[in-house]
Amino acid sequence: MTLNKVKYRDFIAPLLVGLIIWLSSPIKPASVSMNAWHILAIFVATIIGCITRPLPIAGVAIIGLTLTVLLGIVPMDTAVAGFGSSTVWMIAMAYFMSRGFINTGLGRRVALVFVRLFGKRTLGLAYALIGVDLVTAPATPSNTARAGGIVYPIIQSLAETFGSDPKDGTQSKIGSFLVFAEFHGDLITSTMFMTAMAPNLVAVTLAKSLHITLSWMQWFLAGIVPGLICLLVVPYLIYKMYPPEIKDTPNAKQWADDELAKMGKMSLPEKIMGGVFLLALVLWMLSSFIGLEASLVAFMAVSLLLVAGVLSVDDVLHETGAWNTLVWFSILIFMANELNKLGFIPWLSGAIGGALKGFSWGIVLAALVLFYFYSHYLFASGTAHVSAMYGALLGVAVSAGAPATFAALILGFTGSIFASTTHYANGPASVLFGSGYVTQGKWWQLNFILGLFYLVVWGGIGALWMKVIGIW
């Protein structure tokens, strides 16, 4: 065997920053305990390590947890308590469900059906592909899995069918438009559903630590109007700003028909997968009304898939994305919760709130959203960014007088739309930009424009919609 690759140089920044914070404890605020200050140092170092990635994010998180216990900040029993979070396990269960979509071929079949129905024109093709993302989003907490595992292979096949390949300079025929439209479709669907990506569930957990409970249905109802507006308008805006050379795609329907013919009739595993998915979706919608935990619904769905034989125990054990997420998510949530329990987050919220004293809560919340959104240029992970800032910013908003649930949702939505910044903003950006169809200049330029659009729709229209439905 050979040693696994470790990028030791990338440990320098997190270690340096962590040590600086640790050693600056003599100048810490008097109201912040020494333990709170020390866990802040390890937490910030861990977040920076998640950005520089000397090891995969789970490895960085394990090192952070080890140091927290080794240095006597918290006992081991407290440190591992985060692994018992129902939200963490809900993410893992939803990952297993998404594996069912891929294993059974149901995800691909749904995509091909959408292409056959709406793919006569290139713009319709983009809406069709985004429709696949919309349908699978509620039960796929990995937006990278949706964009990269289900939709991108279809885009790649379509691009090849129409002779669009970045290798020979023909990417602008159709591939560039479809790739960029799918990125934004994935971004929008990630914002609409609590269970559509891991950072949303990080936000829900952090809000709960501040005694603000967000249900699946509450998130969905708050996001449905701004989400649908974006789903309808954004692909058209991209079509106008970044038009494909090929406007009509009559061959797409035939291609989809041929691919569906190769797949044959819908198999029994696909039917079971579809039925279990619909059952989970209905129960998630009703969970807050019938007193059923959303995490229990996810466990029920996976249990049914195991009993029916759609998933095997090996599928569960080898779903590395789920176990990887469970490790780092548990550890980051543990650290963030400790910062709150030990008093650092309340102190920080009070300090920022004091600096903004005299301004109305609306102005304070708007300023926090803008800061949260544009600071994502400094992050390469939505989860790292949400873990680092969401709790503190929400505390500031609430202390300024903002309605708690409204502030939690607005900041929660911002934790998704801020991906419309860079080509390294999140997993789907890395996958789709990495395909080579869109240049970095175009990616940043178009995202800057669309980012402004998202801020207006989610922060403006979304806020008015939440007023109408009584959230504030």
Image (tube, rainbow, N blue to C red):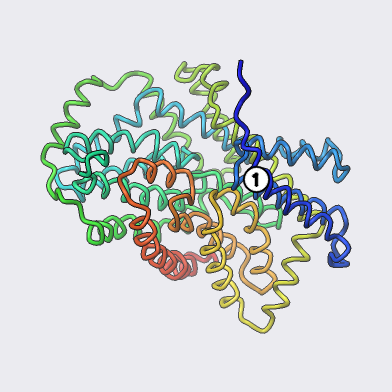
Residue 316 shown left or right of residue 113 in the figure: right
| Residue that appears at 52% across and 63% down | 373
Q: Where is residue 241 in the image (x, y as percent from the top left)?
A: 25, 61
Q: Position of residue 73 (x, y in %)?
A: 86, 46
Residue 348 shown left or right of residue 145 in the figure: right
Closer to us: 288 or 415? 415
Closer to us: 77 or 170? 170
Q: Where is residue 305 in the image (x, y as percent from the top left)?
A: 48, 23
Question: Mark 1 — residue?
Answer: 49
Q: In this view, does 49 lie above or below 373?
A: above
Closer to us: 40 or 89? 40
Looking at the image, which residue sits at the far bottom? 358
| Residue that appears at 12% across and 37% down | 251
Residue 293 shown left or right of residue 461 in the figure: right
Q: Is residue 373 above or below residue 160?
A: below
Q: Position of residue 169 (x, y in %)?
A: 22, 44
Residue 101 shown left or right of residue 314 in the figure: left
| Residue that appears at 84% across and 56% down | 23
Q: In this view, does 239 lie above or below 152?
A: below
Q: What residue type is labelled 1?
A: Gly
Provide the secondary structure element on which disc 1 rests.
helix
How many marks the image carries: the answer is: 1
Q: Is residue 39 above or below residue 94?
A: below
Quadrant in the picture for the C terminus = bottom right
